[in-house]
């Protein structure tokens, strides 16, 4: 198996890959001032968003969603993010509007989003539009294999705007998603080439 390691990302590079302005210029500074100011490393941050009813993981239909709690998933995501050189902001809300507000606020703060929108996956044009609006890369995650379930779960508005979708691997799907976003952002580099 190829071993990968992850290198720190220069702020200027993060600005290129995620449109993030970590190094605001003084009003009178020219373009060259930006790269000069940004010659330091940053830890790119990923927003992990969880939608409705995912706060009940562990006791909610364990035959479908497993026994892991959302706190277990958060702990494992933090450990995985550490190995990838990513910071993580892990959140859950049952409210569509709150999720949309968090997606809006991610612009300029986070390099990408891992999103399990729960049942809003199948209904929310508003969340789809929020993702399109912020132009951040989104990896969609589901614990269960939504395509083996009821037909109404086969439709995903998130997939229409996501980089890709991972489903059916339980909590491990979040780990795959973090790896995928690191790779998508160009943060992952094969050993010896950084
Ligand atoms: C979680 C939910 O809450 C459901 O509404 C989705 C998804 C599937 C999951 O598998 O993580 O249909």
Image (tube, rainbow, N blue to C red):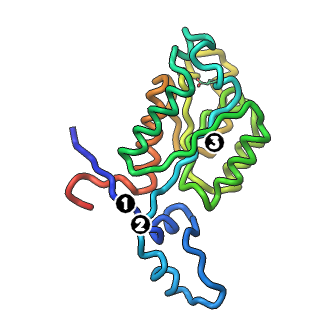
Extreme-top residue of the structure = 63
First in sequence: mark 2 vs mark 1: 1
Q: Residues within 10 Å of mark 2 (few under 14, many from 20)?
A: some
Q: CA distance from mark 2 to mark 1?
A: 6 Å
Q: Quadrant of residue 23?
A: bottom right
Q: Nearer the viewer, residue 114 or 162?
A: 114
Classify 10 Å Cα crowding around label 3: few (below 14), some (14-19), many (20 and above): few
Q: In x, y percent, where is residue 55?
A: 65, 25
Which of the two labelled residues, at mark 2 and mark 3, occupies the earlier sequence position? 2
Between marks 3 and 1 in the image, the one whose residue lies nearer the viewer? 1
Q: Residue at x 35, y 52 (%)?
A: 188
Q: Position of residue 189 (x, y in %)?
A: 30, 55
Q: Tags 3 and 1 in contact by the CB under 8 Å rule?
A: no
* Residues tagged 2 and 3 counted as in contact (Cβ below 8 A): no
Total number of numbered discs in the rendering: 3
Lateral position of residue 105 relative to residue 42, left or right: right
Instruction: State the residue position of label 3.
Output: 160
Q: Give whichever of discs 3 and 1 has the lower sequence position.
A: 1
> Could you tell me which secondary element the residue under label 3 belongs to?
loop
Tell me the number on the disc at residue 41. 2
SS for tag 2?
strand
How many angstroms separate mark 2 from mark 3 (CA)?
Answer: 33 Å
**Side of 184 relative to 111 (left or right):** left
Left or right, residue 194 beside residue 23: left
Q: Residue at x 45, y 82 (%)?
A: 36
Task: Measure how far apart labels 3 and 1 are at the Cα level.
Answer: 31 Å
Kindly check if marks 2 and 1 are in contact, taking CB atoms under 8 A apart as contact. yes
In the image, is residue 135 above or below residue 150?
below
Q: Which mark is residue 131?
A: none
* Viewer-closest of 147 and 74: 74
Residue corresponding to mark 1 = 8
Q: At which x and y percent is residue 134?
A: 67, 56
């Amino acid at each position: 198996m190829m071993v990968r390691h992850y290198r720190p990302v220069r702020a200027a590079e993060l600005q290129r890959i995620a449109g993030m302005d970590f190094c605001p210029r003084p009003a009178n500074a020219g373009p060259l001032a930006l790269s000069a100011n940004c010659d330091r490393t940053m830890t790119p941050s990923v927003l992990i968003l969880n939608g409705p009813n995912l706060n009940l993981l562990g006791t909610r239909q364990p035959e479908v969603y497993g026994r892991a709690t959302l706190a277990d998933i958060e702990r494992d995501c933090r450990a995985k993010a550490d190995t990838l050189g990513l910071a993580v902001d892990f959140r859950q809300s049952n409210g569509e509007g709150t999720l949309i507000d968090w997606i809006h606020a991610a612009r300029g703060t986070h390099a990408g989003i891992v999103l399990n929108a729960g049942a809003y996956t199948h209904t929310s044009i508003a969340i789809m539009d929020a993702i399109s609006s912020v132009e951040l890369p989104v990896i969609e995650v589901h614990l269960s294999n939504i395509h083996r379930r009821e037909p109404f779960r086969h439709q995903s508005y998130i997939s229409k705007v996501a980089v890709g979708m991972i489903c059916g691997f339980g909590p491990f799907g979040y780990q795959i998603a973090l790896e995928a976003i690191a790779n998508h952002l160009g943060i992952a580099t094969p050993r010896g080439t950084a």
